[in-house]
Image (cartoon, grey):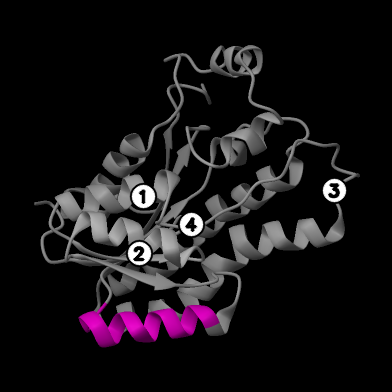
Amino acid sequence: MKLKDKIAIVTGGASGFGAGIVGKFINEGARVIIADLNIELANELANELGERAFALSVDVSDSLSVAAMVDQSLKAFGTIDIVVNNAGIGHIPQPLDQLSESEFDHIFNVNAKSVYHMAYHIVPIMKRANKGVILNVASTGGVSPRPNLTWYNASKGWMITATKAMAVELAPFNIRVNAINPVAGETPLLKTFMGEDTPEIRAKFLSSIPLGRFSTPEDMGNAACFLCSDEASMVTGVAMEVDGGRCI
């Protein structure tokens, strides 16, 4: 029960790595708001996980939507102890000069500006409480970029830098900020990263991971739980690679 009675928000929590984080947090005693654009899927997961899971609709790229979600969370639980900025999107591998401006804007609105929106609406709550934990789900792409995913890589590099800057600025308020960098996993984004999902492409991708497997939602849940728990009370500003050695 490492997160007993903590109130957590996990964006993009209805599927993939987000669902793994939500499930782990619930098992460790937290009450979790599953904040997702796909409210039907979020409700399904909340019903599956029981009374300590609560589904809310949110578009993290829109400040008003985030504000409404935060307001509903406070009305339901009174406070917010943990925020996991997990919602994110990728793009089909393509030359950097061929990605459309509209798609570029969408990637940065969801992967980067969302962190700003969440901080804008939640950091004041944590400052008043003089405590809190923020975890950003970045990517190995932000550390060891691959060709033809330049703008996705850049958005995750932005998130890693934001994590470190936030950690320094918010430390006096007893707010810790960390990130985790997963390698690709069995999530809806896998095909996006690989271009197409074939045994040959999977084998090539896995050959670049020393431990020889994809990241799993359980891997992300375990890492997130540690960084958001009191066991990591001296850990802030870290971008932890949970990647089977991909970035070595």
Count all numbered tags in the image, as a single digit. 4
Q: Position of residue 206 (x, y in %)?
A: 54, 16
| Label 2 residue SS | helix
Q: Which residue is mark 3?
A: 99
User: Which residue is more in the foreground, 108 or 176?
Assistant: 108
Q: Residue at x 25, y 61 (%)?
A: 47
Mark on residue 163? 4
| Amino acid at the residue labelled 1 | Ala
Q: Earlier in the sequence, mark 1 or mark 4?
A: 1
User: Which residue is more in the foreground, 187 or 231?
Assistant: 187
Q: CA distance from mark 3 to mark 1?
A: 29 Å
Q: Which residue is mark 1?
A: 19
Q: Earlier in the sequence, mark 1 or mark 2?
A: 1
Q: Is residue 110 left or right of residue 246?
A: right
For the question of whether residue 10 can be seen, the reply is no
Query: In the rendered image, which quarter is residue 110 located in?
Result: bottom right
Query: In the rendered image, which quarter is residue 228 located in?
Result: bottom left
Q: Is residue 141 above or below residue 170?
A: above
Q: Residues within 10 Å of mark 2 (few under 14, many from 20)?
A: many
> Is 67 colored magenta in this rendering?
yes
Q: Residue at x 60, y 76 (%)?
A: 62
Nearer the viewer's eye, disc 3 or disc 1? 1
Q: Which residue is mark 2?
A: 43
